[in-house]
Image (cartoon, rainbow, N blue to C red):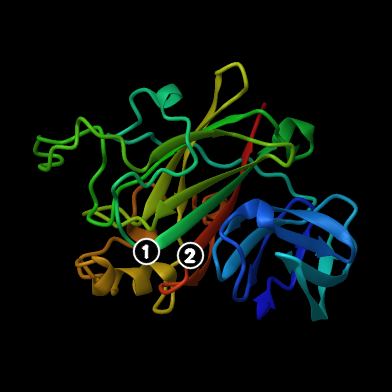
Amino acid sequence: MTSFTASGAVGSSIVITGTNFSTAVSDNTVTINGITATVTSATTTQLVVTVPSGATSGAISVTVNGVTVTSTSSFTVTTASASCTSTDSETAGPFPTKSPSDLVKSDIRSDRTGVAFSIVITIENKNNSCSPLEGALVDIWHCDKDGYYSEYGGTSMQTVDYTSVHFLRGRQTTDSDGKVAFTSIFPGWYQSRATHIHVHVYNAAGTSLLVTQIAFPEGSDSAVALVNASTANGYTKGMSGYTYNASDTVFTDSLDTELATVTGSVADGYVLTHTIVVSA
């Protein structure tokens, strides 16, 4: 274990980095001051973990295949923010998933290649003091590294025809912590839009609660800049002609509730964590 997120509230996602983790989530056991935490995604160098109920500040321990390492510094359990602000609604855009109930899966890559990317989304209920919402249906979709969407194409809006395939689209149901997790590749971008992910949240009965979009942090050292410079991974556009959040017509008036946290590296992959607040 080489590093970990220094602090977080119960129910939040934290990232632990190191080496020789198991890619099978169930093979990694993580405790925070002796309380077992839930591992939501795993690579050989990075674990995403949910801070468990009852956790108190203290050392983090990771056990893999019978070998345990314990941090020398402490993780700090913080108090959740008292604010409870609904996430802004946005357009589903021109490329919504056509039959989301047919795409129940957590690995949405299909044949798409690019920088490894894990997406962890928490759904909270504004009508219950922003407590986690269990049983919500969460659909996501985003473009590939070249800026193309599946299920559409062959038109002036998207010349490449991908009408018969369904890459980078999926549906998951939130667990008791209000979380869903997806395995994907880092999205590319296309003209007039910043890098983004579309999300549609339904209650357990299938009633729509919110359509929104997730924005990405920007800057010279951001994942967006570093990934788009990674020609070795097939990202050929760079940042020339890129539309930044401040100029994106979707995010100019609502970025505060839609900006995600993105951690990681081009070599090891990135993890996006984001909380969406709905009224259920």
* Residue 221 drawn above or below residue 42: below
Q: Quadrant of the N terminus?
A: bottom right
Residue under the point 54% across and 34% down = 172
Q: CA distance from mark 1 to mark 2?
A: 8 Å
- The image shows a total of numbered marks equal to 2
**Residue 74 image-quadrant placement:** bottom right
Q: Where does the image place residue 151, in percent across and percent down from the top left?
A: 25, 32
**Residue 166 image-quadrant placement:** top left
Whether label 1 touches label 2, CB < 8 Å: yes
Which mark, residue 247?
Answer: none
Residue under circle 2?
Answer: 270
Three-letter amino acid code at disc 1?
A: Val
Residue under the point 29% across and 47% down = 111
Q: Where does the image place residue 240, in percent across and percent down from the top left?
A: 20, 70
Three-letter amino acid code at disc 2?
A: Tyr
Return the disc, 1 or 2, that comes first in the chain's sequence.
1
Which mark, residue 115?
Answer: 1
Q: Is residue 253 visible?
A: no
